[in-house]
């Protein structure tokens, strides 16, 4: 949070929609979080998610006093495929598509310019403006948390793809001999092995083979990646096997991505970015020849907040305001 010891002229209301929670915040154009508030989220459908976004924005406006004198716009980070230029949310997940004109809906409701983009795209945008992007025009923002996705910056430009689907790397096969079936129909996808959810699934599938494991299995509760990694570091065999498989999968993924886009930096973000144990193990499995041109190596974000997607959402809202102003000048 920014120390509120001076007058703040303007801000953007930002929304970061997550799988279990939604974070709203008032952000300055310089990327400083003034205030924020957590809300529950519902990502079962785009319709349900939009309804909750609208309710959360209305609640925030009425219950959290704005710090800045003027609000420039609203920026929203969502999961799935987004046409950021037109403000249309195409798809929340494969097979669950419902074209949603987020920009039109929000602007009609709140009378502020609105921008929307994918959550990892927003985090990458934030990194580009305030983090490693100040030093590199060729980096990959690798988000490893509940799921796995990436943002690619090449020649200083974010890569969107022809159908706004670039960076959906969770379905990259990294273990061709794996018996882990992914929802996409292939075996050995990295997300089902190395994400937080994937590691939980591996523990649940394998724990009966490890009767002496220290990992606690509770009915109806997810085993967190942090629990698995801590158990591995403490010498638990199940924890080690699951986390080692994750480390090998992530190292294969990284080397494949390096061959594709030739980055000088791999920036790690997401819920598992802070695990020194995991990333030390990942580095043990990297081929030095493959990584020789990644001059900055694997690094954590330079940003001073874990809320990179929220900051990126604010930047999308700021861009919507700037575009609105230019359009207004033309008229």
Image: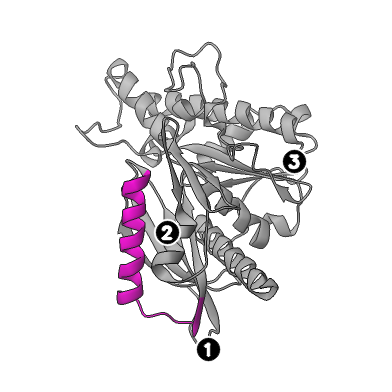
Q: At numbered mark 1, what does the secondary structure look like: helix, strand or loop?
A: loop
Q: Position of residue 246 (x, y in %)?
A: 50, 28
Q: Where is residue 301 in the image (x, y as percent from the top left)?
A: 60, 54
Circle 2 or circle 1, nearest the eye:
2
Marks 2,3: beta carbons within 8 A: no
Marks 3,1: beta carbons within 8 A: no
* Whether residue 235 can be seen here: no
Name which residue lies at 74% across and 35% down.
261
Q: In which quarter of the image is residue 146?
A: top left
* Whether residue 189 can be seen here: yes
Name which residue lies at 62% across and 26% down.
252
* Residue annotated with mark 3: 263
The mark that comes first in sequence, 3 or 1, is: 1
Dot 2 crowding, Cα within 10 Å, few <14, some 14–19, many 20+: some
Marks 2,1: beta carbons within 8 A: no
Q: In which quarter of the image is residue 131?
A: bottom right
Q: Is residue 70 magenta?
A: yes
Q: At numbered mark 2, what does the secondary structure look like: helix, strand or loop?
A: helix
Q: Give the range drawn in magenta.
A: 46-71
Mark 2–mark 3 Cα distance, whole angstroms, equals: 38 Å
Name which residue lies at 80% across and 37% down.
293
Residue 7 image label:
1
Dot 3 crowding, Cα within 10 Å, few <14, some 14–19, many 20+: many
Q: Using residue 18 as the reference point, say whether residue 90 is left or right of it.
A: right
* Residue annotated with mark 2: 105
Q: Position of residue 192 (x, y in %)?
A: 45, 26
């Amino acid at each position: 949070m920014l120390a509120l010891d001076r007058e703040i002229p303007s801000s953007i209301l930002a929304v970061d929609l997550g799988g279990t929670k939604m974070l709203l915040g008032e952000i300055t154009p310089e990327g400083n979080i003034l205030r924020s508030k957590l809300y529950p989220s519902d990502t079962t459908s785009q319709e349900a998610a939009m309804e909750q976004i609208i309710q959360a924005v209305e609640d925030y406006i009425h219950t959290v006093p704005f710090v800045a004198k003027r609000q420039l716009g609203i920026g929203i980070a969502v999961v799935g495929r987004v046409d950021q230029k037109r403000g249309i949310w195409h798809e929340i997940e494969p097979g669950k598509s419902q074209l949603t004109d987020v920009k039109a809906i929000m602007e009609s409701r709140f009378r502020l310019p609105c921008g929307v983009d994918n959550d990892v795209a927003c985090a990458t945008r934030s990194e580009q403006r305030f983090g490693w992007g100040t030093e590199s025009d060729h980096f990959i923002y690798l988000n490893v948390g509940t799921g796995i996705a990436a943002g690619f910056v090449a020649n200083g430009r974010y890569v969107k793809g022809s159908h706004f689907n670039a960076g959906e790397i969770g379905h990259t096969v990294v273990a061709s001999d794996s018996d882990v079936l992914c929802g996409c129909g292939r075996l050995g996808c990295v997300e089902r092995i190395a994400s937080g959810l994937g590691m939980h699934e591996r523990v649940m599938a394998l724990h009966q083979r490890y009767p002496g494991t220290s990992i606690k299995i509770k009915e109806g509760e997810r085993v967190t990646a942090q629990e698995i990694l801590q158990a591995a570091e403490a010498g638990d065999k199940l924890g080690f096997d699951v986390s080692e498989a994750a480390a090998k999968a992530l190292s294969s993924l990284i080397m494949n991505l390096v061959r594709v886009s030739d980055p000088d930096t791999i920036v790690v973000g997401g819920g598992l970015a802070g695990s020194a144990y995991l990333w030390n193990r990942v580095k043990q499995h990297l081929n030095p020849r493959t990584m020789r041109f990644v001059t900055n190596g694997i690094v954590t974000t330079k940003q001073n907040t874990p809320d990179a997607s929220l900051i990126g959402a604010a930047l999308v809202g700021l861009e919507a305001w700037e575009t609105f102003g230019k359009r207004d000048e033309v008229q």
